[in-house]
Amino acid sequence: MELLQGAKDKKQHKYVVDFLKEFGFQTLAMTENTGYRAAVYVEEYTLSNGLRAGDAIIAATAVEHGLTLCTGNQKHFKALKELRLKIFEP
């Protein structure tokens, strides 16, 4: 979701879709813990970093599953110290 949202045109969209297929990414269900963590992130980081609900859910999912978040949007996520980031540039 995060990578597709960042695509600026159809070419980048296709590149991201192909990337996700090639590496076999999977969708993870949102749990109660993920929802709670996302709510905490919104409360703590919306005003200071512009973190929105969708980004908070994505970040919380990554943290809850011990995964690295691959994103082209470093600005909203850099303040979350427990979140591992990999910056993606198509």
Image (tube, rainbow, N blue to C red):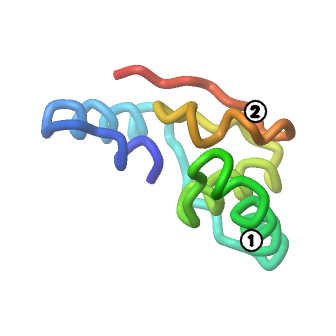
Side of 38 where 33 appears, left or right: right
Side of 4 where 29 appears, left or right: right
- Three-letter code, disc 1: Ala
Q: Secondary structure at mark 2?
A: strand
Side of 87 where 10 appears, left or right: left
Q: Look at 78% across and 58% down and name the residue there.
A: 44
**Relative to residue 88, is residue 53 depicted above or below?**
below
Residue at far front of view: 47
Front-lying residue, 31 or 77: 77
Q: Position of residue 53 (x, y in %)?
A: 58, 66
Front disc: 1 or 2: 1
Q: Which residue is mark 2?
A: 84
Q: Position of residue 14 (x, y in %)?
A: 21, 37
Q: Earlier in the sequence, mark 1 or mark 2?
A: 1
Q: Which residue is mark 1?
A: 39
Measured Cα–Cα span from mark 1 to mark 2 = 19 Å
- Three-letter code, disc 2: Arg
Residue at far bottom of view: 32
**Relative to residue 76, is residue 44 depicted above or below?**
below
Quadrant of the frame with the C terminus: top left
Image label count: 2
Q: Tell me the crowding category of disc 1: few under 14, some 14 to 19, or many 20 or more residues within 10 angstroms, Cα based.
A: some
Front-lying residue, 29 or 84: 84
Q: Look at 44% across and 53% down and name the residue there.
A: 1
Residue at far left of view: 10
Q: Position of residue 84 (x, y in %)?
A: 75, 32
Q: Look at 71% across and 57% down and name the residue there.
A: 61
Q: Secondary structure at mark 1?
A: helix
Front-lying residue, 5 or 17: 5
Q: Are marks 1 and 2 in contact (CB under 8 Å)?
A: no
Q: Look at 79% across and 52% down and name the residue there.
A: 65
State the mark number for residue 64.
none
